[in-house]
Amino acid sequence: MKISATHSRHSSFSSLSESELVNHIHIPSSTPPLSTMEHDMNESWVALDDGNGNKAPLAEAAMEALVKTALEACMDRSMWTPNGGTAKLLKSGVWEDTIFDNSPLVLHSHTNHQHPPNPQNQNKAVRIPHPKGSKGESDVLVWSGTWSHTYYGHDLPAIRCEAIVNMSPSSLAKLLVDSSRVKEYNKMSIGRDDILVLHEDDKWVTKICVAKTKPPMLGKILVLKNLLHMEELPGGGEEVGYVIVSRAVAHAQEDDAAADVEDPSKVVHSEMLMGLNVIRAVEGEEDRCVLINLNHLRSPMIPMMFAKKLGLSAAVNFINDIRALC
């Protein structure tokens, strides 16, 4: 993140003097946007908008770094431990041509236009082991993972899942990005609102969302305020696929994301430390895709001892709820 942001600063602000550069807007800063937040010198904050609803100068560098970091974690086989059922599926070898490093991803560079991707190293559609209608197409592969860094949230487990979905890449991407359709696949959702849209078209979406869910039997409302960013992979969305990332954000002027909730005491603010959906096109089958999902969530509602178990269960439910719409 710091390297990408620094490159963007040097390439975009060379005409500005040091005294004209503003923390967060032009320079990543360890100073949090809110005084109520803990100041950690190992963390950096970057503004996504300029305060007037426009994309901030460092926003694209932040997006590029977020996508790169999420994909590197997602495709790092050494980070992930399969659960019991997944370990058995992997021993058969049928998924070997689909998962992890066997299907590398090449990304757009939004901050360095001097070095376009090598055409010999372009993304391709993936092969899948099971034909439509077969028993095996219902497989859901699930892993839990731990982080090698010691930054914020490193002690919390991450969850990764991968599965075949009988939906075209663009249809699935549109479904996951459209806030008005969240309730179709998340029965606990009580709504997701777009509070700031920085860019939106068929190939690229960047916006800030506030999502509210009400898990059964807990009597609490879980609130997440996230950046949501979607872009098609180089080579084309329908031909190759899409990547969608999300991460918790803070508002520079403290507001109440739960202002419309009748009883604020029943609201629990949680953080999406890393969210990722990779939608891969399937070779020779335009109405199918492979969905890879990564979630790294921090919530006071979830005791540490249950975080892994609940995360694994939620990952499988997410895939099956998506499949129910096919």
Image: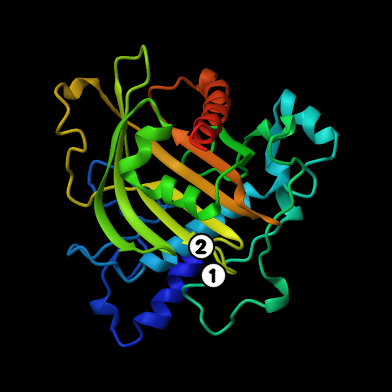
In the picture provided, is 108 more to the left or to the right than 35? right
Q: Amino acid at mark 1?
A: His
Q: Earlier in the sequence, mark 2 or mark 1?
A: 1
Relative to 160, say whether 231 is above or below: below
Of the two numbered discs 2 and 1 in the rendering, the one whose residue sits closer to the viewer: 2
Q: Quadrant of residue 300?
A: top left
10 Å crowding of disc 2: few (<14), some (14-19), many (20+): many
Whole-percent x, y for residue 66 in the image: 48, 56
Q: Residue furthest bottom?
A: 15
Residues 243 and 250: in front is 243
Q: Is residue 273 left or right of residue 102?
A: left
| CA distance for labels 2 and 1 | 9 Å
In-image side of 259 versus 274 (left or right): left
Above or below, 254 against 102 in this view is above
From the top left corner, tell me how far across and down residue 204 is, in percent.
Answer: 41, 63
Question: Which residue is identified by label 1?
Answer: 108
